[in-house]
Image: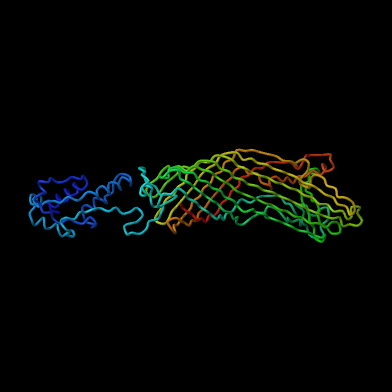
Amino acid sequence: MPRTSRSIRHLAKLCIWAGVVVSPTLLHAATPIPTQAASQPGAPVARAASRPAPFPRAARSRQAAAVAATPAPAIGRNLTTATANPAQTAAVAPAAAVMPANHTSTVTPIPATTDNAGSVQPASAVFCDDAGAGCDAVAMPTLGGGLACLPIWGQFEYLMWWDKDSTVPTLASTSPAGTDRTLAGILGQTGTTSLFDSSNLKTDTVNGGRITLGLWMDGCQSLGIMGRAFFMEDQTTSFSTASTGTDILARPFFNSFTNEQDALLLAFPDLFAGSLDITHKTEVNGAEVLIRQAFRGGCNYRVDLIYGYRYVGVDESLRINDSFEFTDAAQITFGNTIDQTDLFDVTNEFHGGEIGLAGHSTDGRWSLDFQTSVALGSMKQTATISGSTTTTPPAGAAVTSTGGLLTQASNIGTFTNDPFTVIPEATVTLGYMISPRLDLSVGYTFLYIDNVARAGKLVDNRVNLTQQTGTLDGPATPELVFNDVGYWLQGVNFGLNLRY
């Protein structure tokens, strides 16, 4: 480019940015040359207004507005002729559209909610600075109001999760027809098979829901409070079987008095007819109240510190009901019916503090979120073991005594434990904006709960039947043992995210 033309352009830029008005003496007698429209891509004013600035968006917006309000000064012919010949000056004019001499060029800032083509930007890409909140910090994507930086956001998720299966000892067994009575139903004997054990407690998916509500405490979304709660459907496993005596039905156990495997017969040809019902149930839920505080951020991402309180509850129960009738007419007990119940119930309640990080990033209509945290606190475990045996003769009143088969005086009662517990959790979510205030999302969550007491682990299948008479002879079994185990939940989340 000729030196004269470059000088003219540099001078024009200097006048626009600094607001310098050329001396009236020079301009009084000058006839202005045609100027380029600020709306054209090649115009000096437009290029100057669109040049990136090394300071926050709010400051850039105010600077652009100030520049737009300052008329572009006209450059007189006498200034031009002092530095260039007419041929060089004429070469500048064709580069821009010719406008009237009294026209004033202005720069109109593009609204923050539209792109250069005039299309609406995603709400998550609009910043509080753009909405006039007056924040001088680095602008970050909004989680709540988006276009207007309103303070509320919410998320509703359907959870399709899996959990760690519970374990129980073998609670029901059978043997082939013709098996000797002294061997029938006993584990380890030829032909004995399990009818109910840990394999019966395996579940497929567990349905649930999670609700998140948040409120920003300031217009710049640097400090907020959020609450989150989840609940899973009750997982119930039921088993029921009965026999008139044709098929062998038994409840196996380890006889600690004789120190060998044994079995209680419920159904056996010509001796007993009976039934057995087993119900196992698991309930899980949780809640959090957290402070969310801005930690790091940029033009399209933010990372927040989260800290607060967490609660998690895991409840389980195992109920075993059996009933059998003496069918041997030669026995004095003929016609008597015996009903037994064993109940193992446990509750786990975690209360503790939680700390972690939550991130949010955007790319057009797409967003990516993560939340990872660890909670430290106390797990209050309460185990209740109870049982009963009711004998009903053909004539006369029924008699009920304490204790069933796996519940005896040695382990019946209510017991508590309070171990220190750690609960880590991680969630990642991919979202897509279908409207300025509504997103759809899909994600994955892994939650681990340390030191959980489970109902199946409370069962001690070592039984000393001598205590049923009131006088214990031998080891005091069964006994209570808190066999804490780790418990996890994981799965897919499908969400609906709202901004207000």
Decide: is 357 above or below 173.
above
Quick check: 257 above or below 109?
above
Picture coordinates of residue 9, whole percent (x, y): 17, 51
Q: Residue at 82%, 45% (x, y): give it.
A: 401
Q: Is residue 311 left or right of residue 74?
A: right
Residue 186, percent across and down?
78, 52
Quarter of the image for residue 207 reads bottom right
Q: Quadrant of the N terminus?
A: bottom left
Display colour scheme = rainbow
Q: Residue 490 versus residue 131: which sits nearer the camera?
A: 131
Q: Looking at the picture, how far across and down is residue 458, in whole percent?
A: 70, 45
Q: Nearer the viewer, residue 247 or 3?
A: 3
Residue at (66% x, 46% y) in the render: 454
Picture quadrant where residue 325 is located: bottom right
Indicate left or right for 72 with 282 as reference: left
* Closer to the camera in the image, 454 or 189: 454
Image side of residue 30 versus residue 305, left or right: left
Q: Residue 91: x percent and y percent?
A: 12, 58
In the displayed structure image, the side of residue 323 where residue 480 appears, left or right: left
Question: How many numbered callouts?
Answer: 0
- Does residue 402 sit above or below 238 in this rendering? above
